[in-house]
Amino acid sequence: MTRLEWDKIDERLYETGIDRGVLYLPSSPGIYDDGVAWNGLISVDEDFGNEDPKASFFDGVKYLDRYSFGDFAATLNAYTYPDEFLPFQGVVDIGEGVYIDIQGPEVFGMSYRTMLTNGEYRIHLLYNLTAVPDDVTYSSLNDSPEPVNFSWSIFGVPESAFDFRPTSHVILDSRFLSDEMLKILEDIIYGHSGYSSDTGTIDGLFPWTIQTDELDGGLAGNVGPGTVDGETIILPPVKPSLPHLEDLIGMVVNLHPRIIMPERVTGLSYLIDGSGDLTSSHIPGIYDDLPLTRLAPSEIEGLYLLSGAIE
């Protein structure tokens, strides 16, 4: 074993600040499928509510410290907040620019990013939050105006997490996630503007994932756009959303991205490795869709069409 070293340049890491705040709006209980940017975040003071250890003794000798875990809570500070946050602090829009206060707050989701000194970062995902606004002080204008600082006490209800203890706080660390996994997760939580290309498809495949230098189909050794089948790829935008915690865990653990390969002769399809349509799930033989999947629901419930390309 080598001797320990301290203060190595690449290990002098600390977190430097907060950015990329996102507010997630619920469409139904526990489903946060529409995110909006939260500008003006100042800080998130996390409080996990953990109790002090309680000692156990036997024959006058301490033999155990019992530790009781709390649940996530925090104080959120910001110079401003999106209009969509008003219902979550008990303010209701009754129309024509009139708002009424002290109404029942709604439950929401949130994420923010904390930066590390080496350019890496951690993304914090918060689930099932309730916000209690703190007092606000409005002062007279003077020759040195300062922005009003808004703050809220937020409390999270834990989300189911398979075999782990339920939690309402998850951290994604860019240092340890693969580039592919990180991109997939960021496409989910931050959204994606979609994709449109006039380079077309190669026998139904994404041109940026295929190695080809043959006409109409053969796979070869050179990366290139290959032959166009006369179609334009159009992948619709993906709305930012907060993934269900068990779905997120399943995706990270079982990630094996695949592309659906249509077979023109038989009309069947098969899967090849590559970031595109589907990924393995925790259930053998069952696949989950990826953010930019070409699968779209058909008129028959449970059946899907391979879309994303039109003539």
Image (spheres, rainbow, N blue to C red):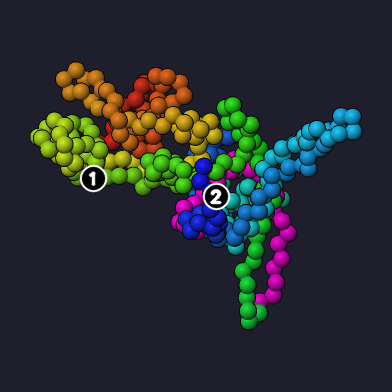
Disc 2 marks which amino acid?
A: Leu
Vertical order, 94 against 261 (above or below): below
Q: Which residues are magenta?
A: 117-141
**Residue of label 1:** 197
Residue 230 image offset from top left, x and y in percent? 15, 37
- Tell me: 126 left or right of 223: right
Q: Earlier in the sequence, mark 2 or mark 1?
A: 2
Label 1 secondary element = strand
Vertical order, 64 against 136 (above or below): above
Disc 1 marks which amino acid?
A: Ser
The residue sitting at 63% across, 47% down in the picture is 88
- Residue 120 magenta-highlighted: yes
Q: Residue furthest left?
A: 215
Residue 96 image offset from top left, x and y in percent? 57, 55
The C terminus sits in image quarter = top left
- Residue 157 magenta-highlighted: no
The residue sitting at 27% across, 41% down in the picture is 234
Q: Nearer the viewer, residue 266 or 74?
A: 74
Label 2 secondary element = loop
**Residue of label 2:** 4
Q: Residue furthest right?
A: 60
- How many numbered callouts? 2
The residue sitting at 16% across, 20% down in the picture is 265
Vertical order, 61 against 82 (above or below): above
* Residue 213 visible within the image: yes
* Residue 90 visible within the image: no
- Tell me: 167 left or right of 188: right
Residue 47 image offset from top left, x and y in percent? 69, 48
